[in-house]
Image (cartoon, helix red, strand yellow):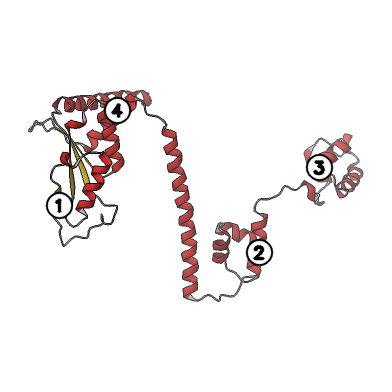
Amino acid sequence: MAHSRGKYADFEGLRERAVALRREGYSLRQIRDELKIFNNDILNRLVKGEPPPEWTKRPNAKDDLRAKARELRLQGWTYDQIETELGCSRSSVSLWVRDLPRPDRRRTPEEASAIARRGWEAKLRVKDEERRRTKETARKAIGDLSPRELFLLGVGLYWAEGGKDKPYERRENVAFVNSDPGMIEVFLAWLRLLGVERERLRYCVMIHETADVAGAERYWADLVGADRSRFNKTTLKKHNPKTVRKNIGDSYRGCLVIKVLKGADLYRRIEGSWYGIVESAREADQRNRA
């Protein structure tokens, strides 16, 4: 023994005292202080084979689930059933009950399908909640937008979704198209930031002819807070009977086009600002690479 001489020469005597203290309910720390044994290896060897007192064991948050899982397994429940009932992972169920006898298979195909479906639905609920929490956290992290931030955001939105000049056809018109109400609201807030008067705005709904055209027109008019006189004639998209439309239902309202009258100067500012954003992004990217 490495410590057969010196301080721990009387190992067996120390072990007898350590075991006696352990059986009286002493913790390792208390035994260490009582016997003045400050070598953890020696201390553990002195009490080897003696279980720790109950009061030193930390409570396990899953103890109740484990006990319930074992109870259900003894009643003949399968892993799938226990997993669905307790809402825990299959690996945990396996760890808790693998020493128990395997139940006889008594499920019908319908029962097996129902169990699998409930398990899948439970997992979908968990994923939906994770998705909701992530989105909510990201939403709160935005906070207030400064005028500069809103300006840059609006330029980016327009260059992605707005009409743009072509070298072979100079028009310099400002026209923004989108089906997302949020995008429309942000674009209108951006126009107000730039001082564009409401009188210079014109709107047009674009929608499939088989959709609820009147309902869509009312929806967009209410969203932008504009009188129907500011709306141009709705553009109807012809229905192709060979295709199956997926954009159907009450939530489908087509797209809204927002046009700014006398917008040539605004268009030039948008295009110039976009090129400025691109140049700044390149410079920032080069700094990040350095």
- Frontmost of labels 2 and 4 is 4
Which mark is first along the chain, 4 or 2? Answer: 2
Please tell me whether mark 2 sits on a helix, a strand or a loop.
helix
Residue 152's label in the rendered image is 4
Cα gap from disc 4 to disc 1, whole angstroms: 33 Å
Depth check: give the residue in front, 264 or 274. Answer: 264
Q: What residue is disc 1 on?
A: 237
User: Disc 2 versus disc 1: distance between alpha carbons?
Assistant: 62 Å
Label 2 with label 1: CB-CB less than 8 Å: no
Instruction: Give the quarter of the figure containing the C terminus.
Output: top left
Q: Which of marks 2 and 1 is nearer the N terminus?
A: 2
Q: In this view, does 265 lie to the left or right of 219?
A: left
Comes first in the chain, label 2 or label 3: 3
Q: Marks 3 and 1: in contact by CB < 8 Å?
A: no
Task: Name the N-terminal-most of marks 4 and 3.
Answer: 3
The amino acid type found where label 4 is placed reads Leu
